[in-house]
Image (cartoon, grey):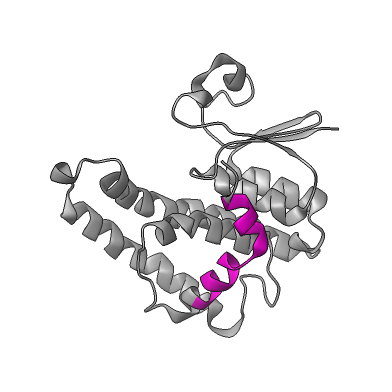
Amino acid sequence: MTTKLYGISSSRALRSLWAIEEVGIDYEHIPTSFRGDSKQPEYLAINPNGRVPALQDGDVTLFESMAINLYLAKTYGGALYPADPVDQAKAVQWSVWGISEIEPLQMRIVIQKRFTPEEKQDPGEVASAAKGLERPLAVLNAHLANQPMLLGDDFSVADLNVSGVMLLLSMLEHDYSHHPNVQRWADACYARPALARARAKD
């Protein structure tokens, strides 16, 4: 059975490259850019949305990074996927939380800083999004006050998915050090060797 992961590390696919490196299975990385490659007919047959990442694992085809990562963790990840049904639900909860509470706000900053010509950038839009991020970051900081990781003591797919979403904030050099528990947790997540391997995938 051949496992194929489509995407490049300079995109949301980094989240799933990180996950597949964490679980440690053999796979074929197919560099697929969101700037054209993902709109080709052969790729649209895999992900009709024309976005990355996508996963083919034998007869299984998946898109959306959170779904891919939960599948990889449950199928191959061992301790990365929690055994307790409540913790399994919480892993899904935090994954959805990351893409609903953090991602829309950080994407407003990305659009301004990365995709808008400097002379057309709107500092007010950046400031508004940064202010909006304070609420979910405070929620995350409070949750991490008495435990090192989202589900307790050990790194899990919940941590991978939420910190994977927040990689964009790190790349934007967004300062959340005034949320010290978030900073500590993020530093621990981003120090993992699997992420370094994933970043090297172009």
Which of the 4 quarters of the picture holds residue 159? bottom right
| Vertical arrangement, residue 91 with respect to residue 201, above or below | below
| Vertical arrangement, residue 162 with respect to residue 60, above or below | below
Image x and y of residue 79, in percent: 79, 64
Image x and y of residue 2, in percent: 81, 32
Image x and y of residue 114, in percent: 31, 45
- Outermost residue, left side: 119
Most frequent secondary structure within the magenta stretch:
helix
Residue shown at 17%/55% (left/top)? 124
Q: Foreground residue, 40 or 146?
A: 40
Residue shown at 60%/44% (left/top)? 201
Which of the 4 quarters of the picture holds residue 32? top right
* Residue 91 visible, this orientation: no
Q: Work out which quarter of the rendered image holds the C terminus and state it.
A: top right
Residue shown at 64%/24% (left/top)? 46
> Residue 63 in magenta?
no
Q: Foreground residue, 86 or 52?
A: 52
Q: Is residue 150 left or right of residue 82?
A: left
User: Which portion, as a residue range, is magenta?
Assistant: 184-199
- Outermost residue, top side: 41
